[in-house]
């Protein structure tokens, strides 16, 4: 800390604009959501106070809980598909066999820099019934009967919208984990190899414990990223067919803006807030536990 | 030979190594190609006309044409140029403000003990934990009430606010590591507080400010959901919004959609491939430290 402190007036002068802007864009809407959630309000000039009725509806709203379930499903798929696969790739790149490491880094990272909207469109074109690459491929290998209108299949749709997300971020987590493994002493790995440790044993018993804190950071990022899934689902299915690919943010959006039910939409926003905070909070506790264990 | 002796390899082991090598390289090459394949596929497919694309979706164009690009760029209804301009303006102003505010607030939190610093700290921490989509509906309501929605500057407000916590934390932890002797010396030399802040500290913080700028450039450029609810005017829409517009308008004309997507993606894709090493470094640093 400094020996000479600026005057309170100076401190206030510097901090008031950024903090006011921050409060206006983050906390004012939160309070507003809480306020409007107690009203029956269709977005027009009239609104009626209905107490906690919106919340009672929300607790019984099967679609809302289904959406929450879909978010959790996405989180699980993506933790395995993004962080898990990224770890496997890191181990593969780490072997002395693999060439072109720099290219894998640059190309692998690329999808994570383009917008989820663009990724959603690209994959919609891949899944397209008549002109999609997936059906083209199935026809090419003689599996014509397996072709279908992919995104119209309610049983598959959640997995199909998860695949672009997984694909988009494998490289991102791969690069983060790679930077962590770069700090591992090469001699440790070499002596393990000389002692006859298999690649699998090295990965589980040597590399994983050494980069545990980075893996946990990746999992936290992955969980919070997927709790806010919206963009690519909006683009690919808009939650359909029916509500088979509805996630919380998409449901809040469609209730508020397509059904113009702003009061209930605000209650859903509060629900997203509470559930999102709960899930992200739990993961962070996990992170704390994991790092403490290490010390 | 000497290498083989060292590891005591037999012919069988060498062959097994050969197979492993081919398999592992193949896995990584397939993955890397899958990551840029969509871009390459869009690049050459956008040079086809609709009929040719529908007949063969995967083949190279037999007589490449720039027709799609011309059509997309010359039709003012699509607002392609406007959307790029809007995205550039929103991103540049937002990132500049995020970096600047992040530096200022980060400096005060790292160096100056003052009343209210705890509250600011907690508010920023909460901002990082809040699920942003719970703000989607209420921010629309608040912005509509105050007449702030659907203006050229509308999106800058939430983007700066959402980018601030991470920027402040990165700058704060960077500045905390600097020796206070810097400011002490400047103050002995008669340098004012503001002078020290901008002429002494800010230049030293350049690396962390660049990291923040890289992180935020991509998130501002790609942001979609808040643009979707806050912008109604097609002339004001940003690139991701424009994409949803023209995919609707062009319905099944895939090559034309691809041409439009390529044009709107171009700035960020070029930026990535020119500065990929710095960008990867910055994004990783931001992710791990945040």
Image: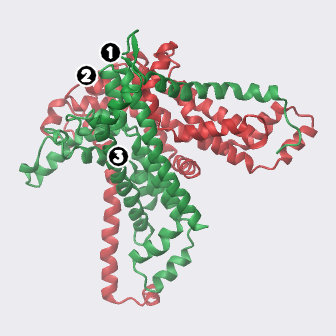
Chain colours: A green, B red
Q: Residue at x 60, y 27 (%)?
A: A23
Residue depth check, mark 3 versus mark 2: number of the one nearer the observer? 3
Give SS at disc 1: helix
Outermost residue toward the left? A145
Marks 1 and 2, how far apart at CA: 10 Å
Residue B249: give its label. Answer: 2
Pointer 2 chain: B
Tell me whether the residue at label 1 lies in contact with that at label 2, contact meaning CB atoms closer than 8 angstroms: yes
Give SS at disc 3: helix
Marks 1 and 3, how far apart at CA: 31 Å
Q: Residue at x 20, y 34 (%)?
A: A242
Among the 4 quarters of the image, the one containing residue B170:
top right
Front residue of A234 and B269: A234
Among the 4 quarters of the image, the one containing residue A291:
bottom right
Within 10 Å of the Cα at label 2, are there few (<14), some (14-19), or many (20+) other Cα atoms?
Answer: few
Marks 3 and 2, how far apart at CA: 25 Å
Q: Quadrant of the C terminus of chain A?
A: bottom right
Give SS at disc 2: helix
- Pointer 3 residue: A165
Within 10 Å of the Cα at label 3, are there few (<14), some (14-19), or many (20+) other Cα atoms?
Answer: many
- Pointer 1 residue: B77
Pointer 1 chain: B
């Amino acid at each position: 800390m400094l020996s000479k402190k600026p005057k309170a007036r100076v401190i206030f002068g510097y901090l008031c604009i950024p903090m006011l802007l921050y409060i206006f864009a983050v906390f004012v809407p939160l309070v507003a959501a809480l306020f409007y959630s107690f009203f029956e309000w269709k977005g027009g000039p009239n609104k009626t106070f209905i107490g906690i009725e919106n919340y009672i509806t929300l607790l019984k709203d099967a679609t809302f809980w289904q959406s929450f379930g879909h978010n959790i499903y996405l989180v699980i798929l993506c933790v395995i598909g993004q962080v898990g696969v990224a770890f496997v790739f890191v181990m593969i790149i780490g072997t002395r066999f693999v060439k072109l490491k720099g290219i894998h880094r640059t190309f692998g990272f690329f999808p994570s820099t383009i917008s989820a909207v663009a990724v959603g469109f690209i994959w919609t074109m891949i899944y397209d019934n008549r002109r999609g690459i997936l059906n083209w491929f199935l026809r090419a290998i003689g599996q014509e009967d397996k072709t279908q209108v992919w995104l119209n299949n309610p049983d598959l749709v959640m997995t199909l919208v998860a695949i672009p997300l997984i694909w988009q971020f494998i490289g991102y987590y791969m690069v983060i984990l790679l930077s962590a493994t770069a700090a591992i002493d090469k001699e440790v790995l070499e002596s393990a190899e000389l002692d006859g440790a298999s690649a699998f044993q090295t990965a589980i018993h040597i590399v994983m414990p050494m980069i545990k804190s980075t893996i946990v950071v990746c999992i936290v990022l992955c969980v919070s990223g997927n709790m806010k899934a919206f963009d690519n689902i909006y683009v690919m299915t808009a939650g359909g067919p029916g509500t088979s690919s509805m996630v919380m943010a998409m449901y809040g959006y469609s209730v508020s803006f397509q059904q113009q039910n702003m009061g209930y939409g605000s209650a859903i926003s509060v629900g997203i807030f509470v559930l999102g905070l709960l899930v992200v909070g739990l993961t962070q506790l996990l992170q704390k536990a994991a790092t403490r264990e290490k010390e | 030979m000497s290498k083989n002796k060292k590891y005591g390899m037999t012919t069988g082991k060498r062959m097994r190594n050969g197979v492993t090598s081919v398999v592992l390289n193949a896995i990584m090459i397939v993955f890397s190609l899958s990551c840029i394949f969509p871009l390459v596929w869009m690049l050459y497919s956008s040079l086809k006309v609709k009929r040719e694309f529908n007949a063969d979706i995967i083949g190279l164009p037999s007589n490449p044409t720039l027709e799609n690009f011309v059509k997309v760029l010359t039709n003012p209804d699509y607002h392609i140029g406007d959307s790029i301009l809007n995205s550039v303006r929103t991103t540049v102003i937002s990132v500049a403000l995020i970096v600047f505010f992040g530096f200022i607030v980060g400096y005060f939190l790292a160096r100056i003990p003052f009343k209210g610093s705890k509250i600011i700290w907690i508010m920023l921490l909460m901002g990082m934990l809040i699920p942003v989509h719970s703000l989607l509906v209420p921010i629309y309501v608040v912005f509509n009430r105050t007449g702030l929605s659907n203006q050229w500057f509308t999106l800058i407000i939430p983007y700066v606010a959402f980018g601030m916590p991470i920027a402040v934390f990165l700058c704060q932890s960077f500045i905390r590591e600097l020796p206070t002797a810097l400011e002490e010396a400047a103050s002995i030399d008669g340098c004012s507080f503001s002078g020290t802040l901008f002429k002494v500290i800010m230049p030293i913080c350049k690396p962390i400010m660049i990291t923040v700028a890289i992180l935020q450039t991509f998130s501002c450029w790609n942001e979609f959901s808040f643009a979707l609810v806050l912008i109604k005017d097609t002339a004001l829409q940003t690139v991701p919004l424009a994409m949803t517009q023209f995919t609707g308008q062009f319905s099944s004309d895939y090559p034309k959609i691809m041409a439009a997507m390529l044009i709107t993606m171009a700035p960020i894709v070029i930026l990535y491939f020119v500065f990929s090493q710095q960008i990867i470094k910055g994004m990783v640093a931001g992710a791990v430290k945040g």
